[in-house]
Image (spheres, rainbow, N blue to C red):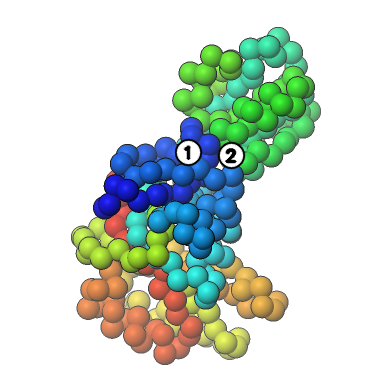
Amino acid sequence: MDNNLNIGYLGPKGTYSYRAAELYSQKLNKIPFNSINEVLGSLKDKSTDLVIVPLENSIQGSIVEVLDFLADEKNNYNIIGELELNINHSIYTLEKYKDNQVQVIFSHPQALGQCYKYINDNYSSAELKVSNSTADSLNDLEDYNIPGAFIGPPWMKNNEKVVLLDENIQSVKNNVTRFVIISSNPHEKVTNNDKTSLVISFDKDAPGSLYIALGPFSVSKINMTKIESRPTKEKLGNYYFFIDVEGNVRDEKLSLCLNIIKKTCNLKILGSYQIFNN
């Protein structure tokens, strides 16, 4: 991959998204953005060549902004890779607040949701405030100027301004986020560790539509690893179905299967890509 390419991520430096971008490639130019929608928008205005964004978390589920972006018929972008990152949240305060009661807790909404049980058990009276990212929550607490805490990644304990209160506070210890790399260019290489993502929808509701559309996967013995519905926003009761299957669209078996499926529904292939292990 060209080392001069720009990859967008949810910043600032120090977020889990930055960590995922580093694991994907240390050589690409990393461009931070303030929100996931801004990260995705950078593909449209061509300020980045590719982006890395969280797609789903094992506790909180899918990131709807990313699903909607991928399903949009006007967006012709491809998932070209994925990686999973273990998420271990810590809670911190500032040195100047270490002897005060925690009145407010800042973090990204995903982190707040992933730590709901710990917060309820230990800081039920604290006000929860949303930050653009876990790394931004430190600055937000400083600016708010009220004794409190913030939830962030474990490496933030190295900051001399902060005091670690507790570690591994996520409600479920096996907390994993799946990140995907999205580009305007498809992934060309076929490996023995590929996954294909697609989205299907139907022009009208009819009994057995989904069963008929998915039947060829079973007949062809193609393993489906995920299915999730999401409203199309066109009218009540209309849904997109996001599906992941093992294999690559260049595989003859999967290619023939998808040719059958697209006769029964609206089919958009989101990408065939390698699963990166870290």
Residue at (58, 58) in percent of width and height? 65
Q: Which of 92 and 44 lies nearest the eye of the viewer?
A: 44
Q: Could you tell me if the residues under marks 1 and 2 are in contact, i.e. CB atoms within 8 Å?
A: no
Along the horizontal axis of the image, is 114 left or right of 141? left
Residue on which disc 2 sits: 133
Q: Is residue 211 visible?
A: no
Q: Which of 48 and 89 lies nearest the eye of the viewer?
A: 48
Q: Helix, strand, or loop for circle 2?
A: loop
Q: Which of 33 and 175 lies nearest the eye of the viewer?
A: 33
Amino acid type, mark 2: Ser
Residue at (68, 23) in percent of width and height? 142
Q: Helix, strand, or loop for circle 1?
A: helix
Locate residue 262, reporting x and y percent: 41, 85
Q: CA distance from mark 1 to mark 2?
A: 9 Å
Residue on which disc 1 sits: 16
Amino acid type, mark 1: Tyr
Locate residue 138, reporting x and y percent: 62, 27
Along the horizontal axis of the image, is 12 left or right of 108? left
